[in-house]
Amino acid sequence: SRSSTRAQAPEGEAEHTGESRPPWPPSRRRPPLLTQPRPHARLRGRRATRSFTVSGPQSLQSGRRHSLPAQSPFSEAKRLVCEVKGPGASCASVDGAGSGFPSEQDGTRTAAGCCCRVGARPAEAGRRAAQAQRAWATPAEGASEFEEASSLLAETPDAATTSGRGQLAPQGHVAVEVDSGGIYGSEEAEESDKTALLQEEKQQPGFWTFSYYQSFFDVDTSQVLDRIRGSLLPRPGHNFVRHHLRNRPDLYGPFWICATLAFVLAITGNLTLVLAQRRDPSIHYSPQFHKVTVAGVTIYCYVWLVPLALWGFLRWRKGVRERMGPYTFLETVCIYGYSLFVFIPTVVLWLIPVPWLQWLFGVMALVLSAASLVFTLWPVVREDTRLVAAVLLSTVVLLHALLAVGCKFYFFQPLPLEHLAPPAQATSLPANLLLPPTSRPKAT
Amino acid sequence: MAKAAESSGDPGTTTPRPLFAGLSDISISQDIPVEGEITIPMRSQIQEFDSSTLNESVQNTIMRDLKAVGKKFMHVLYPRKSNTLLRDWDLWGPLILCVTLALMLQRSSVDSEKDGGPQFAEVFVIVWFGAVTITLNSKLLGGNISFFQSLCVLGYCILPLTVAMLVCRLVLLAEPGPVNFMVRLFVVIVMFAWSIVASTAFLADSQPPNRKALAIYPVFLFYFVISWMILTFTPQ
C-alpha cells in the first residue's frame, strides 16, 4: 500500500510550501523553503501510512526492533531520504551524514527511528534543531503510535529545509527521528511555546537598526569567560564553535581582546625600552606613541581580513563537503579573536629580558593559539581533499606565526640593535669620506 | 476640586477616602462657584527662569555654568551614589578637562616626529573616541543609560587623572631619579583607582546585572591607557 502522505499536502501547510509535493521518495531537487518549521504542529491528527521505513538493516539495532509494533511502517524496507540540517544539532549518535538510530547517549533515548534535524537559517539552525530535538527526545514508552511518527518522516524532509545551507545532499540519507506519539498529544502548550519561540527568532531586524548590532553583543560575563577558557585550552575533539559559541557568535570578545592586545603590545614595548635604558643609560628613551597606531591597525586587520579570506575560501569549497557547512563569517571572526587572547599574558611575560625565555613563551603561545585554530577548523576541512586541507591549515598556522614573530621583532627590539644604532650613524660618515680617497689610487 | 465635591456629595456613595471627608457636609443644592486658576508651580518657575536669562549679565551666565561644572567636579572627587552627573549632564567639564590634559601631554615641536609622545590631536582623539566606544559598548550590551549621560560621566571622571598630570608636572621640575619616578607612579596609581571608583559608582547601576563586568572592563582599559600616557610623559 503505497499511500504516501508525502503526496498529500497536509492541511494548512500547502500555503507554506506553495508547491505540490513530489511523490515519495523525494527527488533530488531542492525542497521548498520553509519559514516555520513546526514538526509537531504538523503531526496533529495525521493518519498512518505504512509506506515508510528507515533505510537499511544496518541502521536498525536489534534491541529497537522489539519495541516496534508488528504492523509498524518500519517493517517495509524503503529507503528514506531526509536532509541533514542544522550544523549545531546533534541527534545522539547521528552526526554528519549519519544514518542510524539514536543511541542512548545523554539519556535522550527515543524510540526507533532516525534523527532529522530541523533548521531554517544557519545561524539559528543549531538552536532550533536543538529545541526540536529536545522536544522529541523523551524516553519512548513503547512505540505505540507510529502514525504520527511516520508522518513525521514524511514531513520533516520538507520541514528540514534551510535557506542558505544547501542542497539536498544526493547521497544523504539522514535519520529521521521518530518518537513515540504520546508526546504530541499532551504537550500542546509546550509546543506552542516552541513555535512562538521559533517565530520570534525568525525575525531579524535590518542591518540599519541598532538592535541588529545588539544581537551581536548578547553575551553575559560568564559566557565570555567560558569562551576565553575554551580558547586557552584546546582539545582535539572539542570544537570551539560548537561547544563554546553554540552558534551565538559575539563581537564583544574579538573587539576588546584586539583592543587590549594592541595597547598591551605598545605599552610593554615601551616598558622594555624603559628597562633597557635603566641598564644602559646611553639608550635614548622616548614614549614611542606611534606604535599604538601601528599595533592597533595590525591586530584589527588581522582579525578581520584573514577570517574574511578564510570564510570566503571555505564557502567556495563548500560544494565538496557533505557533512558540515562552513562557519559563518562572525563565527570565524570569533575563532580568531578569542585565539588571540593567549598572546596577552605572553606579551606581558616578554618583559623579562632573557632572550631564550622570551622565545620559549612565544613558541608556547603560538602552539596553543594555532592549536585552537586548527582543532576548530579541522572538522570543516577534513572532508576536502588532502592537499587543500593541508595547504589551508598550514597557511593559517603560518599567518599566525608571522603575526607573533612580527610583533616580537617590532615592539620588542632586541637590545643590541638599539645600542648599535647611534654608533652606526657615526661610522657611516667617515666611511663616506674614506671611499673617495681609496678609489683614487684605483682610478689612476 | 469641583469634581471631588460632586463625588463626595453623592448621598448614596460612601467615599472611601478620608481626604474628602470634610466635604461631605457641603450641600449640593447651592451653586458652588468653580472658578480660579490652576497653577502649576513648576511651570511658572521655569517660565520665569527662561524669560530672565536673556536679560542677565554675562557674568551671571558664565558663573552659573561654571558653578554647575564645579558642582559636578565635587561629585567626582567625592563619589557618592547621586544622580547629579546623570540627570544634569553637560559636556563642558569633559571638554575643559580633555583640552587641559592634551595641552599638558603634547610633545614640544622640536622633538622628533617619530618617537615622541602623543600630539594634542592624538590625546584628544583617544579621549573622545574612547569615550564614544565605551558608551556604544555599554548601550549594545543592553545598558539603559543615554549616550550623552555616559559621555558626561566618563569625561568628568578624567578629573583625578588631570590632577595627577599637574602633580607629575610639578614633580618633574625636581631632579630626575628613581624617587621621582616612584612618586609619580604612586600618584598616578592612586588617581587611576579614584577614576575607576568614581565612574563605576555612576555607571554600574545602568547595566544589566550579569554584564556589569563586561561593561566596566573597557572603562578600566580607557583610564589605564590615559594613566600610561601621563606616566610616560617626559618633558624634553
Image (tube, coloured by chain):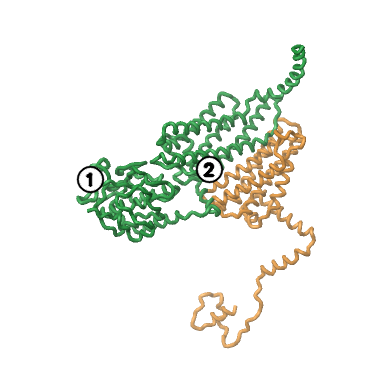
Q: Is residue B9 above or below residue B175?
A: below
One can see residue A243 in this view:
no
One can see residue A218 in this view:
yes
State which chain disc 2 sits on. A
Q: What is the three-letter code of the residue carrying label 2?
A: Gly
Q: Circle 1 is placed at which residue position?
A: A65
State which chain disc 1 sits on. A
Residue B122 percent coordinates (x, y): 69, 42
* Marks 1 and 2 belong to one chain: yes
Q: Which mark is residue A253?
A: 2
Query: For this rendering, which residue is in front, A421 or A359?
Result: A421
Query: For this rendering, which residue is in front, B2 or B17?
Result: B2
Q: Is residue A329 above or below residue A386?
A: below
Q: Is residue B78 above or below residue A441?
A: below
Residue A256 percent coordinates (x, y): 56, 42
Can you tell which chain is drawn green? A
